[in-house]
Structures are given as structure tokens and as C-alpha cells.
């Protein structure tokens, strides 16, 4: 192989990795820098064994809850959703490649790195939605 081809092959490899993604949880919510509003102490204290607090991101509101997304504490492929209501922690649930947290009968906040469908969705962000059955 000539020296002129090596940079071109390297560039093609970089483009291929970028286009296909390097992680199964390559979700856009994790692309931005964490800010203080992404990391409420009530979630960190209540869920520290389940989630990676450095990955916590505020997602938005759903049915009166503040919704937070994070990666699992031990595994980047695990996704966690935490719900806070009126400043108090309500729940944190985690699952491999995705998770759904019930808010009330027939209504849940859901995320999945696979983005599978079927139910009626009200999108909160690109990867997190309210599902209604």
C-alpha cells in the first residue's frame, strides 16, 4: 500500500464509524454537556446505585412529572428514566436498551435505543416519549 492511500483509508474508516455509530445507546440526549438542571440531588441521592449521575439529562415534562434520562451505573447499554414530581423523587427504572415507567393506567414514559413502535406516541425528545395504550 502506498503512503498516499493510508490517509484516504483512515478517513473512510472514520466516516464509516461515524455513520454507523459506535454505541448502542448513541442517543442525541447525551450529546450535550450536562448542566446543573440535569442533575437534581433528589435523583442522584435516590438512584445512585442504579444510574450514572454524570450522564443524567433533563428531558422535559410529562403529565406533571419532570423526566430525567441516564445511562446505567454499571453498563452503558442500560437506560434509566427517573421521575420527579413537585421537587420530590418518585421513581427510577432501568432496562437494557430501554425502559418504560408507568405514570397511570395506560400511560407511560418510554425510551429505547431501538426506537420500536406500535403504541400512540407523544414525543418529549427524539428518544423519549409518552406512550398511550
Image: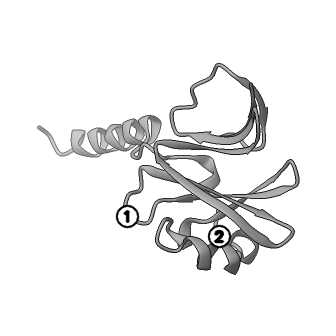
Rendered residue at 72%/40% (across/down):
108
Q: Name which quarter of the figure residue 40 lies in.
A: bottom right
Rendered residue at 68%/80% (across/down):
41
Q: Is residue 107 left or right of residue 22?
A: right
- Quarter of the image containing the C terminus? top right
Number of numbered tags placed on the structure image: 2
Image vertical order of residue 6 relative to residue 29, above or below = above
- The CA distance from mark 2 to mark 1 is 19 Å
Q: Is residue 28 left or right of residue 38?
A: left
Residue placed under numbered mark 2 in the picture = 34
Q: Is residue 111 left or right of residue 71?
A: right
Image vertical order of residue 71 relative to residue 2, above or below = below
Q: Nearer the viewer, mark 2 or mark 1?
A: 1
**Crowding near the residue tagged with mark 2, few <14, some 14–19, many ≥20 C-alpha atoms within 10 Å:** some
Q: Name which quarter of the figure residue 42 lies in.
A: bottom right
Residue 62: where, in percent of width, then height?
83, 48
Residue nearest the viewer, comparing 60 with 84: 84
Residue placed under numbered mark 1 in the picture = 74
Amino acid at each position: 500500500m502506498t503512503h498516499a492511500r493510508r490517509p484516504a483509508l483512515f478517513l473512510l474508516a472514520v466516516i464509516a464509524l461515524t455513520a454507523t455509530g459506535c454505541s448502542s445507546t448513541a442517543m442525541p440526549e447525551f450529546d450535550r454537556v450536562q448542566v446543573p438542571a440535569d442533575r437534581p440531588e433528589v435523583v442522584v441521592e435516590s438512584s445512585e446505585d442504579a444510574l450514572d449521575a454524570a450522564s443524567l439529562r433533563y428531558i422535559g415534562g410529562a403529565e406533571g412529572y419532570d423526566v430525567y434520562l441516564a445511562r446505567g451505573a454499571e453498563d452503558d447499554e442500560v437506560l434509566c428514566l427517573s421521575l420527579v414530581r413537585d421537587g420530590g423523587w418518585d421513581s427510577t427504572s432501568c432496562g437494557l436498551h430501554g425502559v418504560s415507567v408507568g405514570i397511570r393506567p395506560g400511560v407511560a414514559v418510554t425510551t429505547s435505543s431501538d426506537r420500536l413502535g406500535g403504541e400512540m406516541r407523544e414525543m418529549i425528545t427524539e428518544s423519549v416519549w409518552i406512550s398511550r395504550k
